Amino acid sequence: MATAGDHVIPLFISQCRECRFCKSPKTNQCDKGWVNTGRHNAMAPLESRLTCRGKKVLQFCGTSTFSEYTVVNQMAVAKIDPAAPLDKVCLIGCGICTGYGAAVNTAKVEPDSTCAVFGLGAVGLAAVMGCKAAGAKMIIAVDINPEKSEKAKDHSNPISQVMFDGGVDFSLECVGKAAVMRSALESCVKGWGVSVIVGLNVMEDISARPLMLIAGRTWKGSAFGGFKGKDGVAKMVEAYMDKKLKVDEFITHNMTLDQVNDAIELMKHGKCIRTVLNVSPK
């Protein structure tokens, strides 16, 4: 358990270590986390200890990290190496674990396999990193941002029609768009292809032709890359400190909390991979 003065990373998926999910090696879900007691339409717990100008403020994902101070349950923080630079390893608390773990934990990418990653933001690039770490022999990166096309080929046909040799062994959808989720599934080879939904979408339903699955493909989802929060984040920070994990390369801008809206606009328009916000008290 973390104590006063420890360096921690907040977790949007808790790890109480007591519920049936935490005790199972099959999942990183937690029965006691905010997801099971919160407002799903607002992605926030029912109760909040945060106020602004006298009014209660909902606590996004139980953390609300776009603030100088926050209050979270002890099961929702991971104690990390105090020597790790907080302005960098903060990314491990979301996008990097989400993409990297989707490849190595959820998809379980195998050596000499072929992979396709849809969406090249922070999550998608972390998924590419995970595929490489798992030993994939070919990784196809798919994105529609023309500024990322320096080393790419442009295609007008659906992506599933330009995949080689009947499709890839593993595909990861890191966009959060229903149509792309289906394209990722259709890009998998029949018989053993595995497609993982990583991008979050609470507005659309997904659909696919039953034959896609009857033919042997597996369609599954991944939250936070399958990492159990407290254990997984601490180990990923260790990997970074041992120079086995890239993090610095994900940072394209450093901005202050006052510039948070500008930072979000940069991400919305594909002008950065990921933005680190400096929230240190002035």
Image (cartoon, rainbow, N blue to C red):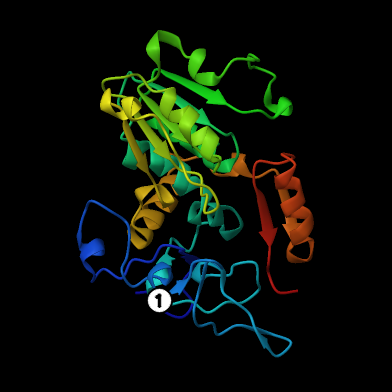
Along the line of sight, which residue is nearer the eye, 70 or 102?
102
Out of 175 and 186, give the one closest to the viewer: 186
Q: Residue at x 61, y 28 (%)?
A: 143
Q: Where is residue 33 in the image (x, y as percent from the top left)?
A: 38, 70
What secondary structure is marked by label 1? helix
Above or below for 5 versus 226: below
Q: Is residue 257 above or below residue 120?
A: below
Q: Can residue 14 be seen in the rendering of this structure?
A: yes
- Measured as percent of width and height from the top left, residue 94 is found at 51, 54
**What residue is drawn where x is 30% and y is 71%?**
16
Residue 175, x across and y down, in percent = 56, 40
Amino acid type at image mark 1: Gln
Residue at the extreme top of the image, as rendered = 165
- Within the image, what quadrant is residue 87 found in? bottom right
Numbered circles on residues, count: 1
Residue 132 visible in the snapshot: no
Viewer-proximal residue, 240 or 31?
A: 31
* Position in image of residue 79 (x %, y %): 41, 66
Q: Is residue 49 left or right of residue 97?
A: right
User: In the figure, is residue 191 to the left or right of 234?
Assistant: left
Crowding near the residue tagged with mark 1, few <14, some 14–19, many ≥20 C-alpha atoms within 10 Å? some
Q: In which quarter of the image is the C terminus?
A: bottom right
Q: Residue at x 45, y 48 (%)?
A: 97
Residue in front for this viewpoint, 19 or 11: 19
Location of the N terminus by quadrant is bottom left
Q: Residue visible at 26% across and 27% down?
A: 214
Q: Please tell me whether residue 108 is drawn above or below residue 212 in the rendered image.
A: below
Residue under label 1: 74
